[in-house]
Image (tube, rainbow, N blue to C red):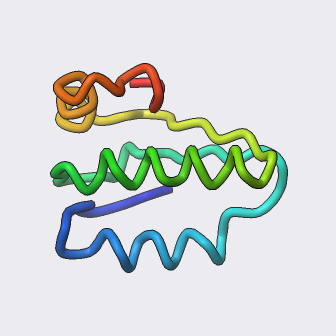
C-alpha cells in the first residue's frame, strides 16, 4: 500500500523503497492512501510497469485516486496504469 503524497519532492525515495519490497511474480499496489500527486506519480507508475515487465512480473494498481486518474487521462496513459 502506498500512502501519502507522491510528488517531485519524494518520488525518488518512493522508487528506492519499492525496489526493496517488490518481490514475487505478481505485485499489487494499493493506491488508496495516496493523498497528493503530480506528474511524478504518473512517471513512477509507468517506471514500475517497465521494471515489472523487465523482470517478467505482473503489476496491478488498485484504488487509483481520482486525481491520479485525471493526470493519467491528461497524459494519455490511463490504459497503461489501469486507471
Q: Is residue 8 above or below residue 26?
A: below
Asked where in the image residue 13 lies, by quadrant, the reply is bottom left
Give the residue drawn at x 64%, y 41%: 59
Q: Nearer the viewer, residue 55 or 3?
A: 55
- What count of labels does the image hold? 0
> Can you say which quadrant of the picture contains the C terminus?
top left
Pinpoint residue 6: horizontal percent, then vertical percent.
Answer: 26, 61
In this rendering, position of residue 28 left or right of residue 25: left
63 horizontally vs 67: left or right: right
Q: Is residue 62 above or below residue 50?
A: above
Q: Residue at x 54, y 52 (%)?
A: 48
Give the x, y percent position of residue 80. 47, 28
In the image, residue 78 sits, relative to residue 48, either above or below, namely: above
Residue at figure coordinates x 26%, y 74% from the top left: 10
Quadrant of the image occupied by residue 74: top left
Vertical relation: 31 (above or below) 1: above
- Judge from the rendering whether residue 32 lies leftward or rightward of residue 62; answer left or right: left
Q: Residue 56 appears at what percent x and percent y?
A: 81, 46
Residue at 27% of width from left, 30% of height from top? 72
- State the image coordinates of residue 79 (x, y, percent, origin top left): 43, 20
Amino acid at each position: 500500500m502506498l500512502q501519502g503524497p507522491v510528488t517531485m519532492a519524494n518520488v525518488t525515495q518512493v522508487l528506492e523503497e519499492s525496489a526493496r519490497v517488490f518481490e514475487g511474480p505478481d505485485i499489487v499496489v494499493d493506491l488508496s492512501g495516496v493523498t497528493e500527486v503530480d506528474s511524478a506519480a504518473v512517471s513512477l507508475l509507468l517506471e514500475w510497469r517497465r521494471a515489472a515487465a523487465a523482470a517478467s512480473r505482473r503489476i496491478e494498481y488498485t484504488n487509483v485516486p481520482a486525481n491520479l486518474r485525471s493526470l493519467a487521462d491528461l497524459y494519455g496513459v490511463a490504459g497503461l496504469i489501469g486507471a
